[in-house]
Image: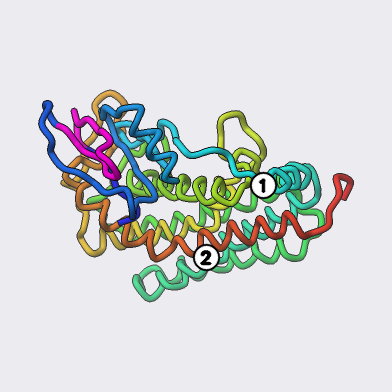
Amino acid sequence: MSTVFIDRKDIEIRVDGNSLSFYAKGQKDGSLPLAPLKRLVIIGNVKIESSVLYKLVNNGISVVFLTGKLRYGCTLSGPIHNNGMLRVKQYEKALSYFSLQLSKELIKKKIASQRDFIFEIKNLKPALAMQVENALEILNKALSTIENTSTVSIDSLRGIEGSASSVYFAIYSKIFPDSLNFLKRVKRPPKDPVNAMLSFCYTLLHYELVREIQLIGLDPTIGFYHQFEYGRESLACDLVEIFRVSVDRLVYELFREKHLSRKDFMQDEESGGVYLKKAGRKKFYPLYEQWAQEHRSSWREEVQTLARRILEEKNSLSD
């Protein structure tokens, strides 16, 4: 398994040759060879020796730290890639017409994937046929506007994307059982099990893409559709847009196949947020890894294609 989730309280991680060893109350409680490992996701209160971090970095293993409520903490990765010219070109293109050009492509892909999933829903839920037809008409119109309007700006593109997502989620929310209380997309904090899983899976996807971006030598903080914002990996935010519907499909399947149910979630009394309980997370991690292994080649290919375009396409700051 190339990704391992460490989700257990009061565990200490140490280096043991070419393996990681896990200790509970001073006693060894398991080990993990480094050889197949590419990603380590650490959740909650885990003690980790500095020698472990050094070993992970030297072996090209990315580490993502999440809080006990599955919110992002920080990422650890190795030295920055040597391809400085790629980043110089990236910075140039971020200030050029290339940003708008790429943004239009990203959002067209996103809306097209929303449209395709909505079309499938018509067969899954025949009772929604009329609503689906209306949604498809709106999404097709959004695609046509992006394609045929030369005056579309990044700001107007955000408006088109927001409207399309509203229409999409109005249909998507209706394919889940009423017992899950999923009415619309709510981010912080998630108010129901479906929103909790969407947020968690989007977070994992985001840092999968951060890793691919760093490995090829791009700067994850310099985006094109998502403009620079201090502390945000804007380029990863850009690329996530293409693959959001893949996550939506995964979340739907998790509940449809009854891998997860309402009892796998808890509500935080202070914030009112709904979160996946530890027992539910234990079921989820292998399912996520199986899904991710099927998609990582397409994530990597998208990043590689972008890097080639940044290097090869002629552009100027005045375009």
Is residue 6 at all visible to an observer of this figure?
no
Q: Which residue is drawn at 58% across and 68% down?
A: 137
Q: How crowded is mark 2: few (under 14 residues within 10 Å), some or many (20 or more)?
A: some
Which mark's residue is nearer the viewer, 1 or 2?
A: 1
- Residue 29: give x, y in percent of width and height: 13, 38
Q: Residue at x 39, y 50 (%)?
A: 38
Q: In this view, does 236 lie above or below 249?
A: above
Q: Residue at x 38, y 38 (%)?
A: 55
State the predominant SS element of the stretch in magenta: strand
Q: In the figure, is residue 238 to the left or right of 11? A: right
- Residue 188: give x, y in percent of width and height: 41, 34
Is residue 140 at all visible to an observer of this figure?
yes
Question: Which segment is the magenta one?
Answer: 8-23
Which residue is tagged 2?
113
- Residue 16 covered by magenta stretch: yes
Q: How crowded is mark 1: few (under 14 residues within 10 Å), some or many (20 or more)?
A: few
Residue closest to the far right: 318
Query: Dots 1 and 2: beta carbons under 8 Å?
Result: no
Quarter of the picture holding the N terminus: bottom left
- Residue 220: give x, y in percent of width and height: 59, 42
- Residue 209: give x, y in percent of width and height: 50, 50
Q: Which residue is drawn at 43% across and 63% down?
A: 295
Question: Considering the numbered disc 1 on the image, is that residue within a helix, a strand or a loop?
Answer: loop
Upstream in sequence: badge 1 or badge 2: 1
Toward which corner of the image does residue 67 lie, by quadrant? top left
Q: Residue type at mark 1?
A: Asn
Toward which corner of the image does residue 65 lie, by quadrant? top left
- Residue 192 covered by magenta stretch: no
The label number, if any, that marks residue 238 in the structure image: none
Which residue is tagged 1?
83
Which residue occupies the foreground of this view, 155 or 301? 301
